[in-house]
Image: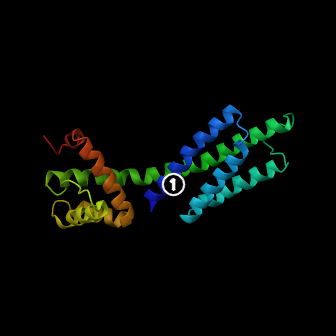
Amino acid sequence: MLTLVREALREQLAQAVVLAELHASGDPRLLDQVGEWLARGEKKMQDLRRTEAASLAAVRARFGAGREGQRDPEISADLSPRKALRTLAALAIGRGEQTLRESLAAIDARLQPLQAQMVQLVSAAHLFGLVGSAPEESHEAWLRALWGRLGSHEKTRGMHTYLSAALPLIDRLYLLDEVVGNLMSQPEQLSSHGLVS
């Protein structure tokens, strides 16, 4: 599940770049786009049952109040109403982005050591001839079968058991797919792990 949340956070953060460009260009759609971005992020996080939904809802509520005329304490009273709204939009983007980045950093910190273990496991599996090429059809079935082979081989069983205890199946398959794809597209990584001479 963490890998799905990580992807949702990355997608939402990528959209913040578009909003920053709208802000820089003075695009009149900025305020509506910021409100929609916050609502989409809140919905995504709510669907994933994440606490970030509440943080984004608070940012969206504060942004909505500012659009309705309530002056944000971080915005100078000397600004014209138009500039105050543009500043409000920039603050909302920044607050939303900070929430997303902090969550993404926490997930990355949690997944990084597990991903390193997955790299070792896949490298060893490659050395023992367990990986092979992915078929064109049913990639997910191939990943599930590979995961099963990793658990049944005596040399990879230990790491397989560790990762099975540490991650739900969806995260294991996602990381497995990511690592297999990276290692197979860059065979020099296999030698950097000391597994291919």
Which residue is the site of mark 1? 8
Q: Nearer the viewer, residue 114 or 126?
A: 126
Q: Position of residue 79 (x, y in %)?
A: 84, 34
Choose top left, top right, bottom left or bottom right for residue 132: bottom left
Q: Position of residue 147 (x, y in %)?
A: 26, 63
Q: Secondary structure at mark 1?
A: helix
Figure label count: 1
Residue at left 71%, top 34%? 26
Quadrant, the C terminus: top left
Along the line of sight, the residue nearer the viewer: 79 or 160: 79
Density class for disc 1 (Cα within 10 Å; few <14, some 14-19, many ≥20) is some
Instruction: Judge whether residue 51 can be spotted in this image.
Output: no
Outermost residue to the front: 137
Indicate the colouring scheme: rainbow
Quadrant containing the N terminus in the rendered view:
bottom left
Q: Amino acid at mark 1?
A: Ala
| Left-right relation of 170 to 85 | left
In the image, what residue occupies the spot 25% across and 51% down?
Answer: 120
Q: Position of residue 105 (x, y in %)?
A: 50, 48
Residue 46 against residue 31 in the figure, above or below:
below
Residue at 16% in and 64% down:
153
Check the image and report above or below for 91 versus 172. Answer: above
Q: Residue at x 55, y 46 (%)?
A: 13
Residue 78, x across and y down, in percent: 87, 33
Is residue 194 visible to us here?
yes
Would residue 126 be found to the left or right of residue 139 on screen? left
Q: Name above or below for residue 172 compared with residue 24.
A: below
